[in-house]
Amino acid sequence: MSDITLILLGAGSASRFKLPLKKQWLWSNDRPLWLQVADNFQTVHNFESTIIVSSKEDIHAMSNFADYHFVEGGSSRQNSLKNALEQVKTPFVLVSDIARCCIDEAMVSRVLLAKKNKSCVVPTLKVVDTLYFENSPINRENAKIIQTPQLSCTNTLKKALATQEKFTDDSSAIASQGGEIIFVEGSTTAHKLTTIEDLAKLPCLEAPSRRGLTGFGIDIHPFEEGKKMMLCGVEIDVPFGFKAHSDGDVAIHALIDALLGASGLGDIGELYPDTSETYKGADSSLLLKDTLRRLENLGYVVGNVDLSIIAQTPRLLNYKQAMRFNLAKLLNLRPNLVNIKATTAEKLGWIGREEGVAVEAIATLYYYDWTQL
Ligand code: MG
């Protein structure tokens, strides 16, 4: 069994990465970046455990992909690392950033081989350009560029971070405690992904797969007198609506479930619980917008959607086009990619007895194609 835990930090907001998706959710073939990074580390060493630090919302999605250990990040890199260290049981810890996404296996091996008690092993690069400090040139032979991953003695690192002082990496924290810093040769392929321009410098990133993902959703609501009826965000002119915790837009609920199905994110009740006061009387269009924001962050693009509304009453023929255009606007799709079908239940069962409405929806998603930038 290994005496090393791997910590991968990816909780930053990535504000310098000017794309709708988060950089850890760029798709490389059919894996998100963070998963490719975590998997590639496992090919170098059989870590005792792998901890991935991210935001609460990302962890909800990440935990469906693989059996790694997920920890919620803090307000800074240092606080995120402290949260992760609380979970570490091994004497050594290897810390890297998900943004340093192209793993040079030989470099990781060099770091692991230099392991020593009460120390921090750091990969470094030589400075090849002329270097100035303020207005004077300095001897570049004495300068080093520091990279990750860094291998630290867990207790030494924990102690070093237990102050109010801010450090930009683990080695500077350990150096402040008088710990030994061991330098090993770094790697020029271990470039950090910070801006869109960096994408061209990262050969390990493959174009996203053109795989289409399909999801299905169904929802049912009974009628309730005196409530406004909303379907696909369009008000239907009848004296009754749907009994529900939210506004009862049964069509949007089915569509949200189809979108969550395609992205593997669970179901509407998980994200917007009907026991929560937040969603009492909620406008379902806003829930759909929030679902779309989540999908966009995770690098998904909606392909098309198709809905079947099964209603004995009301008659929906005259509303179908308005529903199509309204949903298309919400989904930011051309209206031909949003199909609305309405059918009756031929007077059979509870729908036939005009007690409520059922809606079925299907949606396809694709991965955001960052190669077209
Ligand atoms: Mg519902």
Image (cartoon, rainbow, N blue to C red):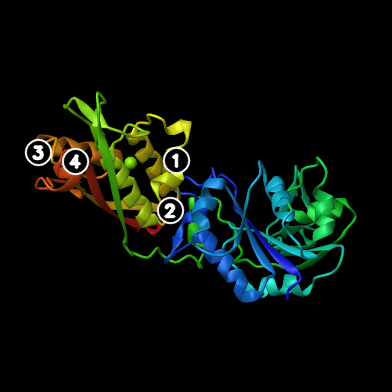
- Quarter of the rendered structure image containing ligand 1: top left
Dot 4 and dot 3 residues touching (CB under 8 Å) = no
User: Is residue 102 something one can see in this rendering?
Assistant: no
User: How far, Cα to Cα, is label 1 from label 3?
Assistant: 32 Å
Q: Is mark 2 within 8 Å of ligand 1?
A: no
Q: Secondary structure at mark 2?
A: loop
Within 10 Å of disc 3 (Cα), the crowding (few <14, some 14-19, many 20+) is few
- For the residue pair 186 and 111, the one nearer the viewer reads as 111
For the residues carrying marks 4 and 3, which lies nearer the camera in this image? Answer: 3
**Which numbered tag is attached to residue 273?**
1
**Which numbered tag is attached to residue 130?**
none
> Residue 268 location, x and y as percent?
39, 45
Instruction: Work out whether mark 3 precedes mark 2 in sequence or the reverse, and give the earlier one.
Output: 2
Q: Amino acid at mark 2?
A: Leu
- The quadrant holding residue 331 is top left
Q: Which residue is mark 2?
A: 265
Would you place residue 247 above or below residue 147 in this image?
Answer: above
For the residues carrying marks 4 and 2, which lies nearer the camera in this image? Answer: 2
- For the residue pair 233 and 248, the one nearer the viewer reads as 248
Instruction: Work out whether mark 4 precedes mark 3 in sequence or the reverse, and give the earlier one.
Output: 3
User: How far, Cα to Cα, is label 4 from label 2?
Assistant: 25 Å
- For the residue pair 238 and 295, the one nearer the viewer reads as 238
Would you place residue 231 above or below residue 130 in this image?
Answer: above
User: How far, Cα to Cα, is label 4 from label 1?
Assistant: 27 Å
Residue at 81% x, 51% y is 173
> Residue 110 location, x and y as percent?
73, 73
Within 10 Å of disc 1 (Cα), the crowding (few <14, some 14-19, many 20+) is some
Q: Amino acid at mark 1?
A: Pro
**Which numbered tag is attached to residue 317?**
3
Instruction: Work out whether mark 4 precedes mark 2 in sequence or the reverse, and give the earlier one.
Output: 2
Number of labelled discs?
4
Q: Which residue is mark 4?
A: 324
